[in-house]
Amino acid sequence: MAILLTGGTGFIGSHTAVELINAKQDVVIADDLSNSKAEIVDKIEQITGKRPAFRQLDVTDKAGLDAMFNEFQIEGVIHFAGFKAVGESVAKPIEYYRNNLDSMLSVLEVMRAHQCRKLIFSSSATVYGANSESPFKETAPTGNCTNPYGWTKYMIEQILFGVAQADPDMSIVLLRYFNPIGAHESGLIGERPNGIPNNLLPYLTQTVIGIRDHLSVFGNDYPTHDGTGVRDFIHVVDLAKGHVAAFDYARKHTGAEVFNLGTGIGYSVLDVIKAFEQANGVKVKYQFCPRRPGDIATCYSDPSKAKELLHWQAEKNLVDMCRDAWRWQQNC
Ligand code: WQD
């Protein structure tokens, strides 16, 4: 039986496809290629020696999804597909709510029709909002999100808790990602942002390669060790391995369970700049700027639940993340 990855040619989806195939799982990908390229399937094959089945499909297309469930024997779904740009979600709330909620509901309806009951969902640390202090435990209050993107993650979490309650045979794992960065060490797959990057690492690597003039560091007056924002950066390959562990967990447990996927370590923006310079022997041109609206000072995880129950923990360090991000930027 195969695991269906919606959004499987995206940044996290493609790395997860690689780790699942490495773990001897059959992978089927559905992706509309709105934010990725078909050639990613070739790269996954190059890395693993095995080509996942691929169908170009917008998963809000229920008939198309149904056809995939008829074509393949789907054991469970890892649902990555969705719009993910925080700033864009503020400008286009209707599109974000429509797309992200619709795609999740379509997947759930088609799964139900085919009695497919294992689901892993890409949630985000953004659901914690500014409600409590780091390190965030899974039991920390959620909601109070600062943008529509975050609200779609929050709302889908609520939907999934309801679905698990209504069908006691469902196995649902909600993974709250912290800040995924880095790329596969082969340099063949990585993050490919559309237009001007919003996130720190793609902006930083594009600055060093000369596409951007300088990196703006948003705020140096936060109550952190050097005044810049602190985040829990996690290597995307570690994150991908977390999905392999989560699917295994879903095979053995029913109900809905939430896990943080982070390292538990907070690094500041300046820590990242310094690590990047040291790891790669380059200089990062940056300037301090005012705080970015909606940012919090510090956000990092308590990853102990995933360690205990998924038997998973992040293994790569900040230098690995910086080195792999730079290799990818030079290749892509
Ligand atoms: C990290 C730090 C910035 C850019 C967001 C979403 C979250 C998830 C991951 C996914 C902050 C600072 C950034 C720059 C900077 N979304 N920064 N200059 O905001 O923690 O999380 O991405 O799809 O839901 O909210 O990540 O990388 O944007 O910022 O100084 O040019 O870097 O202020 O302190 P964030 P980020």
Image (spheres, rainbow, N blue to C red):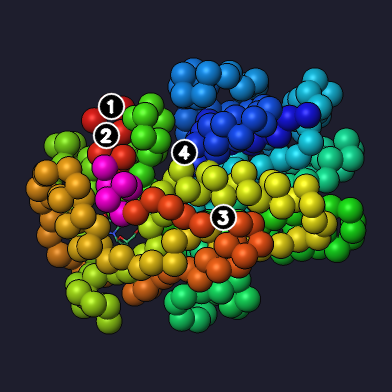
Assess mark 4: CB under 8 A from ligand 1?
Answer: no
**Residue 312, label in figure:** 3
* Residue at left offset 57%, top offset 62%: 307
Contact, mark 1 vs mark 2 (Cβ under 8 Å): yes
Q: Secondary structure at mark 2?
A: helix
Mark 4 residue type: Phe
**Residue 327, label in figure:** 2
Ligand 1 resides in the quarter of the picture at bottom left
Q: Let me know if residue 133 appears in the view.
A: yes
Mark 3 to mark 1: distance in Å? 30 Å
Alpha-carbon neighbours of circle 2 within 10 Å: few (<14), some, or many (≥20)? many
> Earlier along the polypeptide chain: callout 3 or callout 1?
3
Q: Secondary structure at mark 4?
A: helix
Q: Secondary structure at mark 1?
A: helix
- Residue 276 painted magenta: no
Mark 3 to mark 4: distance in Å? 20 Å
**Residue 331, label in figure:** 1
* Residue at left offset 48%, top offset 68%: 301
Name the side, left or right, on which 279 lies relative to 111. left
Q: Nearer the viewer, residue 246 or 295?
A: 246
Mark 2 residue type: Arg
- Please name which of the two marks, 3 or 1, marks the residue nearer to the observer: 3
Mark 3 residue type: Trp
Alpha-carbon neighbours of circle 1 within 10 Å: few (<14), some, or many (≥20)? few
If the image is split into quadrants, where does the N terminus sit?
top right
Magenta span of residues: 318-323
> Earlier along the polypeptide chain: callout 3 or callout 4?
4
**Residue 11, label in figure:** 4
Contact, mark 4 vs mark 1 (Cβ under 8 Å): no
Q: Position of residue 6 (x, y in %)?
A: 64, 36
> Earlier along the polypeptide chain: callout 2 or callout 4?
4
Name the side, left or right, on which 77 lies relative to 284. right
